[in-house]
Image: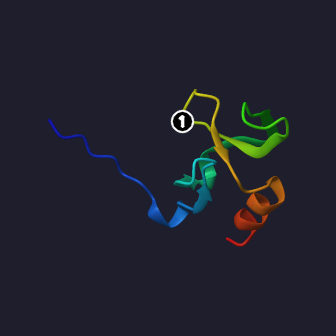
Amino acid sequence: MTYLCKTNKENMKFIKLTSIEGGVIVVNVEHIGHFYPSKVATISSPKYKEFTKVGVTTHNNGGFSVTETVDEIMKLINKM
């Protein structure tokens, strides 16, 4: 069975972010629910690793951890 979804592609705005593992994450900015700076201690180093947590409204997993800062994400969104 095939399901069709009608979308308005003119309203879809995507930004590319970098995961802390090095992969690429493409996010529709209309679906960003939250983003905030965070940090975590690593086992191999006593220093904290800083990153930004980006949560989307379509997932309930706490969001993605990305290398871009909150300011960098805001600049990407505002360029649209």
Q: Which residue is mark 1?
A: 58
In screen coordinates, is 61 left or right of 52?
left
Q: In front: 40, or 32? A: 40
Q: Residue 42 in the image: x percent, y percent? A: 74, 34
In screen coordinates, is 41 left or right of 67?
right
1 vs 69: above or below? above
Q: Residue 27 in the image: x percent, y percent? A: 56, 53
**Circle 1 sits in a helix, a strand or a loop, which is it?**
loop
In screen coordinates, is 34 left or right of 16?
right
Q: In front: 62, or 58? A: 62
Residue 7's quadrant in the figure? bottom left
Instruction: Classify 10 Å Cα crowding around label 1: few (below 14), some (14-19), many (20 and above).
Output: few
31 vs 23: above or below? above
- At horizontal 78% and vertical 66% (from top left) the residue drawn is 75
Quadrant location of the C terminus in the rendered image: bottom right
- At horizontal 58% and vertical 47% (from top left) the residue drawn is 21
Quadrant location of the N terminus in the rendered image: top left
- At horizontal 78% and vertical 62% (from top left) the residue drawn is 72
Q: Residue 78 in the image: x percent, y percent? A: 75, 67
Looking at this view, name the residue that lies furthest to the front.
Answer: 44
Q: In front: 18, or 8? A: 18
* Badge 1 amino acid: Thr
Looking at this view, name the residue that lies furthest to the top.
Answer: 60
Looking at this view, name the residue that lies furthest to the left.
Answer: 1
Q: Residue 74 in the image: x percent, y percent? A: 78, 60
41 vs 70: above or below? above
Residue 11's quadrant in the figure? bottom right
Q: In front: 5, or 48? A: 48
